[in-house]
Amino acid sequence: MHDTHHARHVLDLAAVRNNTGCALPGFDSPGGFDGFGRAYPAEDLRRLGDLVGGWPEGFGRGAHDNVECDGQYIGFTRPVLLSSLVLLGAACGGRTADELSLFDADTTSETEVGFGFPDFLSRTDHDCDVPAVTCSTLRDHGRDIDAPPPSIWRTEIRLAHPVTCSGLRLPINPGLHMFGIRALAENRV
């Protein structure tokens, strides 16, 4: 008989962050989250730091704070017996779905799993969409504007059975953005 213990791993996205989606008041993030200068107010997201593996130095002042999905590979420090993933992110350009790839211990085979996020400005009507945070305002080129406030969404991928996993590859889909990825892994004793 096995006792199953679960460990939570926050994946380190620092090396693959490539988008500046958060801005402090008065900071003009030229491209912003969506490429049009619209951004999340950084001060509203500070409390998510532990869930995203920490914010970068310069957060809200131009530092890359999220991953615009472009096929990036993110590895675990060692292979884990993965049972689920919790993704924090959002889409721009409407609700967007795709697949990410989970790689086995020697990275020779992969398992595709689907996921999706509502638009960052969505007022969703889907029961499965859970905002991790809804901000107080939308920032546009450093100014707060009268518009729907942005949200970062939480989605969970539960695997039908645990999979030994050494890492994952994000899809090539610039409409999807990741702020954080948490893995739930089983340690069997």
Image (cartoon, helix red, strand yellow):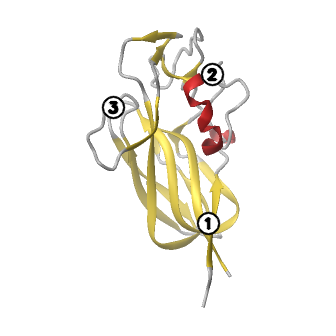
Q: Separation of disc 1 and disc 2 at Cα?
A: 36 Å
Local SS, label 2:
loop
Question: Residue at left 69%, top 40%?
Answer: 15
Q: Which mark, residue 60? A: 2
Which circle's residue, 3 or 2, is located before the other in the chain?
A: 2
Residue 115 in picture, x, y percent from top left: 40, 52
- Nearer the observer, 37 or 184: 184
Q: What residue do we see at 60% from left, 11% from top? A: 27
Give the spatial CA distance, label 3 vs label 1: 36 Å
The reply to whether callout 3 and callout 2 are in contact (CB within 8 Å) is no
Q: What residue type is labelled 3?
A: Ser
Q: Secondary structure under badge 3?
A: loop
Q: Quadrant of the N terminus?
A: bottom right
Q: Nearer the viewer, mark 3 or mark 1?
A: 3
* On-image quarter of the C terminus: bottom right
Q: Mark 3 points at which residue?
A: 122
User: Decide: marks 1, 2 in contact (CB < 8 A)?
Assistant: no
Q: In this view, does 5 lie above or below 10?
A: below
User: Which disc is residue 26 wearing?
Assistant: none
Residue 50 % position (x, y): 65, 43
